[in-house]
Image (cartoon, coloured by chain):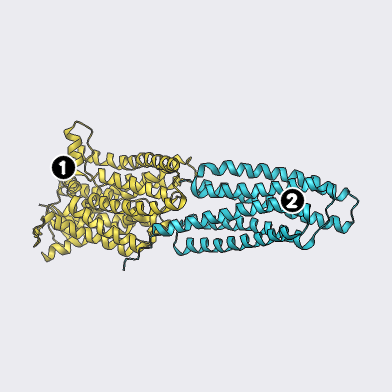
Chain colours: A cyan, B yellow
Amino acid sequence: MLHVKFPVISHTQALENKIDLFHDKMIEAAAVFHRSVRVFLEAGVGLEYKKINRKIKSIEHDADTLRRDIENDLYSQNLLPNLQADILQLIEGLDKINNQIDDVIYKFYIERPEIPAKFHRKLIELCDCSADCAENLAIASRAFFKDLSKVRDYSLKVYIAEQESDQIYNDLKKSIFNSDMELANKLQLDLLVTEAADIADIAEDCADELLIFTLKRDI
Amino acid sequence: MLSFLLFLSSGLFLGWSLGANDGSNVFGTAVGTKMLKFRTAALIASLFVIIGAVSGGSGGAATLNALGSVNAQAGAFMVCLAAALSIYWMTKSRISVSTSQAIVGAIVGWNIYSGKPTDAELFSKIVGTWVLCPVLAGVLAMILYRLTRFVILRCKVSLLRQDFYTRVGLVLAGAFGAYALGANNIANVMGVFVASNPLQSLSFPGGGELSSEQVLFLFGGIAIAVGIATYSRRIMQTVGQNICLMSPLAAWVVVVAQALVLFLFASDSLHRFLENNGLPAIPPVPVSSSQAVIGAVIGVGLLKGGHGINWGLIGRIFIGWVATPIIAAAFCFVALFFLENVFNLQVYY
């Protein structure tokens, strides 16, 4: 008759671990992305880049499994009923960034674009900014679950990195179309650069949402 | 005895309606925010409301009896019925209504009809508690809210742990709230029957004993519990969203503040302690749990900047303070006249 659906503390701990692991995966993905562009520009699609591609696929797969588990646990155990929708949106947003990183790494792997040396520095800077955005967003999101006071600090870092990436992206785009490359190459490179910059844009959108969720989380 | 039970029916009806309405004040926010299931909430509330009524209900009943000792069963029947019907009518008119205010109004109506004097000092004291109750609940909620927020930010409690502790807190606060509701509000339901109570005391084989007054309160407590179990579900699911949106932790703050206020106004021993130490004593008076909740929610709402507070609802409380006792008194006066002259029943001695 008495139907108490109380979350047992062990369930809570298990879910906390999954959320932690999910954020770890995202930070790992950002680190892999950070390295990938350097490896590609230095050695092309060699053995090391193949390893990186496999690594990001495995990270993305693990993150997907964790995301499903987290969502399932939240609903099946009716945890955080007033924040379920927000957390779902947040986790989905973070997962989009993982997918985008995976996409960009995979596109470099498949398309093997020719990138003139004069664009290397800017491209590395752009990818670093995007990776920074992803990493700081993961830290901000972790703080949302553990230490609310830090969410704002790391969200701000996301915004700063995103602004920087916008600037670099615009410069790079201009340089690409002002260069004497074939139009097809220009378009191909532009598309790849846009996708790399999109990582920062998605992170910025997630940070916006996260700040609103933080306000709602406050008692 | 049979006639007494028949007369008691209006009190039981009042108890049922009190349970249906006020049970939601105790667990409404927890159920409304989906932190607790209705069945769990109803079971805990029903159990503790009975315990509160039986063990702590005498203070408020004594105050109501001092205001007007309704000494005939038919008179007590009509006082309760007048209060219940006033509540029904005012609820339909969407005016915030309190059982405490209705019963006090009906008792004054009986006093006027029977020609007995109403203790003006006591009456003004009771009216004072109606204003004090939501204000005190608001202040307590503000203090509790600040304290809880400080602890959570300071201790960096993780979101999921916070959720776990909140659920445990809501169950404990709800049980305390139900106890306080039973102790404070049983006087509304059964208080007027105390003077004409023919029930015997009840001895248990284990050695425990319930006085005749406690047996009466047990009946009333069961009526409130039935009201909670059968009719409070819908109100529970909507309460908490009515005045302003609340998080589960704010809901906890509201329930604790409300329970503390009801407990303060029910506790005989606290009253004596304050009096003996020369402090301003809080009289044991039945107060409105709905208005305590509204006071607490407004307290939390004000701390959050006062946005989203439904001020219209607060206006309806003010109307209720004035209108409820007047309507109940007038209704009781007219109904007593009919009961005495049409049905030839003795409504006072």
The spot of residue A48 in percent (x, y) is 72, 58
What residue is shown with label 2?
A38
Left or right position of A47 against B312: right
- Quarter containing the N terminus of chain A: bottom left
Answer yes or no: is residue B93 visible: no
What's the mark number on residue B117?
A: 1
Q: Residue furthest front?
A: A47
Answer yes or no: is residue B78 visible: yes
The spot of residue A146 in percent (x, y) is 49, 48
* Closer to viewer: mark 1 or mark 2: 2
* A184 or B215: nearer the viewer: A184
Other residues around mark 1 within 10 Å, as few (<14) / some (14–19) / many (≥20): few
Q: Quadrant of residue A152?
A: top right
* B246 or A128: nearer the viewer: A128
For mark 2, give the secondary structure: helix
Left or right position of B259 against A204: left
Q: Quadrant of residue B145?
A: top left
Rendered residue at 54%/49% (across/down): A142
The spot of residue B2 in percent (x, y) is 12, 66
Q: Are marks 1 and 2 in contact (CB under 8 Å)?
A: no
The spot of residue A22 in percent (x, y) is 56, 56
Q: CA distance from mark 1 to mark 2?
A: 95 Å
Rendered residue at 48%/45% (across/down): A218
Q: Amino acid at mark 1?
A: Pro
Q: Amino acid at mark 2?
A: Arg
Rendered residue at 55%/61% (across/down): A66
Question: On what subunit does the disc labeled 2 rest?
Answer: A
Question: On what subunit does the disc labeled 1 rest?
Answer: B
